[in-house]
Amino acid sequence: MTTTAEASLERVWEVLDAVPDPEIPVVSLRELGILRDVRRAADDTLEIVITPTYSGCPAMYQIAEDIGAALNEAGFENHRIETVLAPAWTTDWMTDAARDKLRQYGIAPPMGNCGSAEHAPQERPIRFVPRVVDKPACPRCGSSHTERLAQFGSTACKALYRCMDCREPFDYFKPY
Amino acid sequence: MTTPQHLSYVLRLADNALILGQRNGEWCGHGPVLEEDIALANISLDLIGQARLLYSHAATLDAELYGTKKTEDDYAYFRNERDFRNYTLTELPHAGPLSGTARSDRDYAVTVVRNFLYSTLMAHLWTALTQSTDAQLAAIASKSIKETRYHLNHASDWLLRFGDGTEESHRRAQSAVDYLMPYTREFFSTDDVETSIADAGIGPLTTDLESAWREDVDATLAQATLQKPADAKHVTTGKFGEHSEHMGFLLAELQSLARQHPGASW
């Protein structure tokens, strides 16, 4: 019985592995770290645990709908979505494979590590003066001769950059 | 144990985020340049997202206290002006004190300075709230602090550019600072809601954050070659539900659709 249950959870993970992010379809919800857990509740319902990226991310409804549709199609009809806020989503959870896929898609992946001291204000007082601006490598030509055009871009999680060598504009997935 | 003060405190945080989100959203489609149009819409999205999380949390507290069954929409769309507890600063139009309220009178310096003053406060407040004894509030704070840092960087960058820019941009940035700074007194006026949540370890006393806030504000103003105005005596009262004349118009725009079609969904 337990083995069957485990096998079915494995199968759910497999199904969900194929569900892409609605805004950035080259990466899956699991690779982005939005999909947190899959478990069987006491009433035998499948619980899919997700966490929002930004507080106001408008894609959350779409994400829940996509997950539901994928599960229904695979024959798992008894399920519900559980949204959790803690621990807060961070770009640190993004897998290396996901970062490569972003780059190939034309989005520079987040730099640095948000778990580092720089981003952990409770450990030391920091002054909130403008920090050094990240200089991600151009996802098209690889040049690090890039500049930020705007701190906010096409979605809440991205900033707008341009490459000074190949002259192409590109999105940068901001560290969060 | 949930207290009425706890609920009031969460609603104050939510109202600030919603009302400033609504104000900044007015730039959507009207930004001075395309990148800023997108930036302000993004900042509004974050603020309204924070408001939604906070209102949902308030609904839980409300249910524990009074057995109510409210949703985030009940707070945002179906409360009246006197029920909103946002700082007066967040409801002011994007115009100087004497320049009217027409769309053409909007001044981006007012937008930037307000976001700077508010985000500087929230950077400290969210950081403190990540340690709240209210686990859900701490979870919301842990997300919001990440967003607030980007808002603060955005506002600070523009404040430096305006202050240390042309004669005209400097003049307008200075008059926005002179206009808005007195409203920040309200951040640091303590009442029984704040002392009660501080006693319960839910949140800090903002008076404990004041010196750090001043240090940050002073440092950026100095870098922007702007003068800090003398401290004002008057303290505004938005957080007690007594608002400026601008609040009713803002709420009319925010709430009219939901009130014309109660219960509608799309």
Image (cartoon, helix red, strand yellow):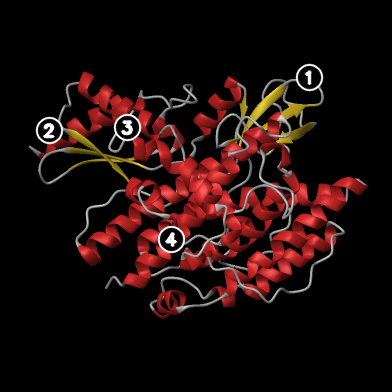
Percent coordinates x, y for residue A137 in the rendering: 71, 31
Q: Which of marks 2 and 3 is nearer the N terminus?
A: 2
Q: Which of marks 1 and 2 is nearer the N terminus?
A: 2
Disc 4: which residue: B82
Mark 1 or mark 2, whichever is nearer to me: 1
Instruction: Give the residue type at disc 1.
Output: Cys
Task: Bin the neighbour count of mark 4 within 10 Å (Cα to Cα): few under 14, some 14-19, many 20 and up.
Answer: some
Evaluate whether label 2 is on the same chain as label 4.
no
Q: Which image quarter holds the C terminus of chain A?
A: top right
Question: Marks 3 and 1: in contact by CB < 8 Å?
Answer: no
Dot 2: chain letter = A
Disc 1: which residue: A166
**Taking B243 as reference, is B99 left or right?**
right
Dot 1: chain letter = A
| Label 1: element kind | loop
Q: Image quarter for residue B37?
A: top right
Percent coordinates x, y for residue A172 in the rendering: 64, 33
Disc 2: which residue: A4
Percent coordinates x, y for residue B146 in the rendering: 55, 51
**Which mark identifies residue A64?**
3
Q: Which image quarter holds the N terminus of chain A?
A: top left
**Taking A132 as reference, is B247 left or right?**
left
| Label 3: element kind | helix
**Taking B63 as reference, is B245 left or right?**
right
Mark 1 or mark 4, whichever is nearer to me: 4
Instruction: Give the residue type at disc 2.
Output: Thr
